[in-house]
Amino acid sequence: MDVATTPYQAFPAAMSYPLRIRVRQQGYAFTRRDALEFGASDEQLRAWCRAEDVLSGAQGSYFLPPGDLDTVTSAAETQRRRIRALLLVLGEGYLVTHQSALLAWDLPTDSSCDTTEIHLGHREGHRWSRRPGVRLHRVPEPIPITTASGMPTVSAAYAIVQVGAGIGVEAAVIPADAALRNYLASPTDLAEAIRQSRRTPGCTRLATLLDLVDPRSESPGESRLRLLLRAAGVAVTPQVVIRDGDGHFVARVDLLVDGTRTIVEFDGLLKYRGAGNSEALVNEKRRELALQRLGYRVVRVVWDDLADPGRVLSLLTPPALQTGA
């Protein structure tokens, strides 16, 4: 998250103005040395942590909890700040890798991807490879280093490949869809990252990655649903525009089963939350009614359904797959 666009951030009342400036400049992270330099004491640090005005990270690092953010965004930003704080303590030469780099690039992750452990890299071998909550990897010289969220990191493409090699190709597809959609990586970048990682254990899992990626899917749920249907042999096209007989726009749908009038929509339910949820629900009902009047059947899939592929496929049985006119 860009510090300049971060929502309102509360500081501990007793934190000095110079320390607030330092903390903000460092992405709302700081070290014990920073605190002592600008007038805070160890006792004050402990008091801030007890009040949860400040959160403690690894090895004497500290960071501020995010401001007014939704639950998912807050969890990701909290972890980014935890990583920034640790990098401040470790000093130069370290960079963010793997799942942690996906967070730095603000890319979504699959549920199989644990982002609570911090993954860091170093150009040279090091005396430690793992500490509680932290794993260190060697990043060889040809691999380029860039910056994301104010942290030195591997490229988005290389982070995707690292995660895919370690967990599996499906874990790489979700961030890859988003990276291509948001112009953080290209198919060429992914291919080059795979080539550079060819000696990495697990990299053979990524032989099909470029064939599976589709930036038209606009959310992790849509990506997961597309992969599920593809694995079951159901050919679908993402983000199809539906028009009426006069050519007027009716809707843009998540997935259309090829050769049919069956629409498959992933419903994350987020759009129905908040003060405007009633209006959003009414608009969605109108949209679905308009599609039905054109002869389309809308199949809705939620997160829980994705854990049971058989259930999803049962929703697509005849007449759902009747060929349309």
Image (spheres, rainbow, N blue to C red):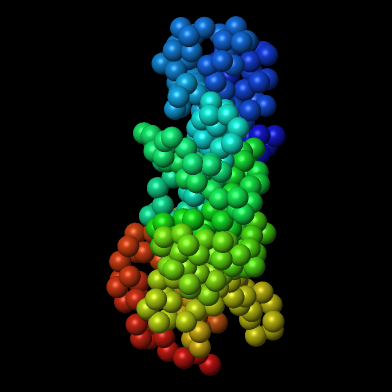
Measuring from the top left, give residue 222's x and y in whole percent: 49, 65
279 to 43, vertically: above or below: below
Residue 115, by quadrant, is top left
Measuring from the top left, give residue 29's x and y in whole percent: 57, 26
7 to 121, vertically: above or below: above
Measuring from the top left, give residue 155's x and y in whole percent: 61, 52
Is 32 or 223 nearer to us in this picture?
32
Residue 4, by quadrant, is top right
Please report the residue visible at 44 percent of the width from the left and 27 percent of the height from the top: 58
Visible in this render: residue 88? yes
Please report the residue visible at 50 percent of the width from the left and 88 percent of the height from the top: 259
Q: How many marks?
A: 0
Q: With 45 as the anchor, is 233 left or right in this view?
A: left
Please report the residue visible at 64 percent of the width from the left and 51 percent of the height from the top: 144
Is 212 or 47 nearer to us in this picture?
212
Visible in this render: residue 105? no
